Amino acid sequence: MIAQADPQELVTPTVDWLAIGPEIALAGAAIFIVLLRSIVRRGPWVYRASLFLAIGGVVAAGVLLGRQWNIVRDDGAIDTIAGMVRIDGFGVFLGAIVVAATLLTVLLASAYVERERLEGPEYLALVLMSATGMVAMTTANDLIVVFVALEVLSIPLYVLAAFDRRRLASQEAGIKYFVLGAFSSAILLYGIALVYGATGTTSITGIADFLAANTLLEQGVLLAGFALVLVGLGFKIAAVPFHMWTPDVYQGAPTPVTAFMSSATKVAGFAALLRVFEVAFPTYREDWRPVIAALAVLSLVVGSVAAVVQTDVKRMLAYSSIAHAGYILVGFAAASVGNRDAAARGQEAALFYLLVYAFMTIGAFAVVTVVARRRHDARHDLDDYRGLAVREPILAGLLAFFLLAQAGVPLTGGFVAKLQVFAAAVEARQYALAIVGVLAAVVAAFFYIRLVVVMFASEPEPAEGEEAVPRAAVEPGTGFVLATCAAITLVIGILPGTFLHFARDATFLL
Amino acid sequence: MDEFPLLTCIILTPAVGAVLVALTPARRPELSRAVGYAATAATAGFAGYLLWHFETGRAGYQFVEDHRWIGSLGVRYLLGVDGISLFMVALTALLFPLGLLASATLTERVKAFTVWMLILEASLLGVFLGLDLVLFFVFFEIVLVPMYFIIGGWGHENRVYAAIKFFLFTMAGSAFLLVGLLTLAFLHARAPGNDLTFDLRVLMEWAPGGLSDGTARLLFLAFFAAFAVKVPLFPLHTWLPDAHTEAPTAGSVILAGVLLKMGTYGFLRFSLTLFPEAAVDLAPLLLVLATIGITYGAIVAAMQPDLKRLIAYSSVAHLGFVVLGIFALTTQGLEGGLFTMISHGLTTSALFLLVGMLYDRRHTRQISDFGGLWKSVPILGGLFVATAFASIGLPGFSGFVGEFLALLGTFLVHRPYAIVAAVGVILAAVYLLWAVQRAFTGEPSGENATLPDLGFRELACVVPLLGLSLFLGIYPKPVIDRVEPSVKGIIEHVEDHTDYEEPAVATEGEEAER
């Protein structure tokens, strides 16, 4: 289109504003918050107002996504901005998970930043900017957009990880995440460049068309290209062996940020990974599927086994999130087989797992946020949870529920998610992956159960010269997060039909 | 379809009870208890109704309920009962009120305990009623959670270790079951003209012919892993002594009375029907393991200084008879296995209740600490001796009928196993009578001399179990009549799909009768 235009006249691509509405709502809210903060330097109501703006922005984004979902379902996918953005069920579904996770993170942080005396408005603005990048990532139909979205989501996260700057661990987390994140972005960019070199386009559907029409004589550049893309995105989803940063960053970052990173970032990373590989490189499936399968096995094994020896709860949950990435990768591997039914089930399983996982993990980290408040989020020893069931039975019960859900106990969303993933793997005849998956689930059950044991079966230790533990009320925002996550995890566990239906509608193979 | 959903009511009553108990204030334990009794009694009432209205002489499933559950996977909410599950349901419904009654001495966190017990009851009933493989698996897995909390929260000294061991062993077993049942369903769906389904009734018609021999064997072993851990078969039994010993009395009662039967029930319901060929081929393996379990369990039981541990090991031996009977693949063997399951549920539960009562009085389970109890607490002593005899399998008690049928069924086709297993019967007499002799005979000394005898509540826990054991020992017909059509159905199913023929000697007696 652009090439044929009159050189005198700059032809801008047409923009479907509704298509990028969610991003605009999120970014708009972020910008308003920053403006507000720079105009009004002081005053207690600034934070309240920015919180209001943030929630408004997120809710608006959610409403727009709902609208998009209906349009997409009735009329099919929308390509806009010269094909750079593609609004389809897949993108909208994952975008909705990101927005829900953002809302929960904002609510979770609302009390946290006040308690820890952090700069609240900036905090919210950064979360919203990062969410903007994530939503953009879910609908990116061009490798350049993938890269831009990745940067937009990552840079605020680097700052957020280091946000509690009085705490050394938080600073360390920020630096570590930044250095490794920058490296991975560079690798991704290099990969994109190589893919462009091999195919002459950066459009994801364009690459697919090119590869479908042409056979490359020299495949080396393309293979190297998508290998590097895989590395770059593997870093964001924290798949082994690109997981080295995860435990340290998850442990050091403020806990609400950890919740955000483990849920929304993973969703965005998988959105890009699935779309790039399933849409752009399906002709090379046989080359990359073994790699995905290997990443899945490594993530499952390393994540589950390493979590067993952790004594820090946040670190343990970090390794567990690596293992969860492994399950989603199992679904992804199943989604890349030739059999269409199996592939559709694999994709559905991966999408559904991301949905369930987001709520399970935010719920668990929300409890961790509350439990760690008396230590100002600096320590999350297993010992701090000793006798929690006696001190705060509801909190302990909720954490136990989220942990059992993550372990895949029936009547929780976690079970249905795992069932779907294993079913997909079996249908795709990837029996080895299914077996590794169930065995990893057994290992994982051990450390989830161990934390539950500590909470329930052990008496609280006599405080060594410490003041008695006050039983503070849970703030309304946090309470809402806990209730929502628990309710959704439970409902999905008992009546998964509707949610599975959504996930199925979101697969792009159908 | 508009019939009264009796089976759903049976499962939901304890579940609703659990919710109600959770709503009672923690400061009023008597309220929690009352709701607990009411819920379990109502469940027992429904189960009684089921027993009454169960149509004798029919092999198929009755009271079937069938609804869609997880559409995209073809998972259904499918319940049904036949002769095999009927008495498991009845046993479960009977043992829970008694277990709660026996826990009346419990003072710690009564509310939470009652909630877990009711959830456990609901999930166990679901295990025996579910006919969809995924639904069965859901209940099979969920059982772990309440049982884990009961052992870990109210058990004895080593409870945490025992609870974790129990959880991990059984979860590792069921991991294979999950992959196995998914594989089975997808292999079925891949065949032309088939939809994805986990309906046992559909799969058991397809699987015997549709699977290749090698696949069927692998799947049989996958299912076997889950069930063998639950039974538990030697050498997967090591979680059992720990779990039984450390669990609170009610926990041990449910573990021994119902939980172990999930494994043998699984063999009957799934292994034999889905993979008859593999079951016939691999039966020698199971017979060997069962025989080892019988003798090994008995010998180890004889060595135990701890009374509760002794009974735990005796379970290994008893369940060995069940597996022996089942994999003898004769009508008598299967009936004997099923009957032993019921009988073991009655007698071993009663033994655990009595040991719990002893523990309440003396706060020890070491046999050497007891002595002369018969003189000081004659009712307890008398009941214990009677229950021990029932457990040994003295004629006149249910244990005799079950073990006799199981041994008979085995003897018809596999003599050596039956002969070795019969030694186990003698060994059972050795370990139990020896324990009785050490603990109950002689002159009581010290604390043993001044113990209070059983109260009314304690009698109400034990006497029904012993009475039922005696009744079924003398008049087993009501059970046999209801069980036999289903057992015959399984045997016929195996014969239809394999070269295996039940030896004529197993059936000719009956023909002569006619």
Image (spheres, coloured by chain):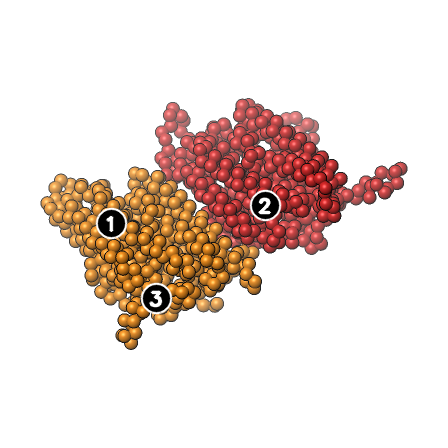
Chain colours: A red, B orange
Q: Which mark's residue is nearer the viewer, 1 or 3?
A: 3
Q: Which residue is mark 1?
A: B298
The answer to whether any part of residue A321 appears in the image is no
Classify mark 1: residues with Cα within 10 Å, few (<14), some (14-19) or many (20+): many
Residue A6 position within the rendered picture, expressed as x and y whole percent measured from the top left: 88, 40
- What type is the residue that disc 3 sits on? Glu
Residue B110's spot in the image, x, y percent?
A: 34, 45
Q: Are labels 1 and 2 on one chain?
A: no
Mark 1 and mark 3: Cα distance apart in space: 30 Å
Tag 3 subunit: B
Q: Within 10 angstroms of label 3, few (less than 14), some, or many (20 or more) residues?
A: some
**Most distant residue in the bottom direction:** B514
Please determine whether, in this image, residue A427 is positioned above or below residue B151: below
Contact flag, marks 3 and 2 (Cβ < 8 Å): no
Task: Tell me, yes or no, whether the two marked residues, 1 and 3, touch with CB atoms within 8 Å.
Answer: no
Where is mark 2, residue-wise? A332
**Amino acid type assigned to the residue bearing label 2 in the image:** Phe
Marks 1, 3 in one chain: yes
Foreground of the two, A60 or A340:
A340
Chain to which the residue tagged by mark 1 belongs: B
Taking the spot 22% from the left edge, 65% from the top edge, the residue there is B474
Q: Residue at x 29, y 71 (%)?
A: B508
Q: Secondary structure at mark 1?
A: helix
Above or below residue A157? Residue B238 is below
Q: Which mark is residue B502?
A: 3
Q: Say if residue A343 shows up in the picture.
A: yes
Quadrant into which the C terminus of chain B falls: bottom left
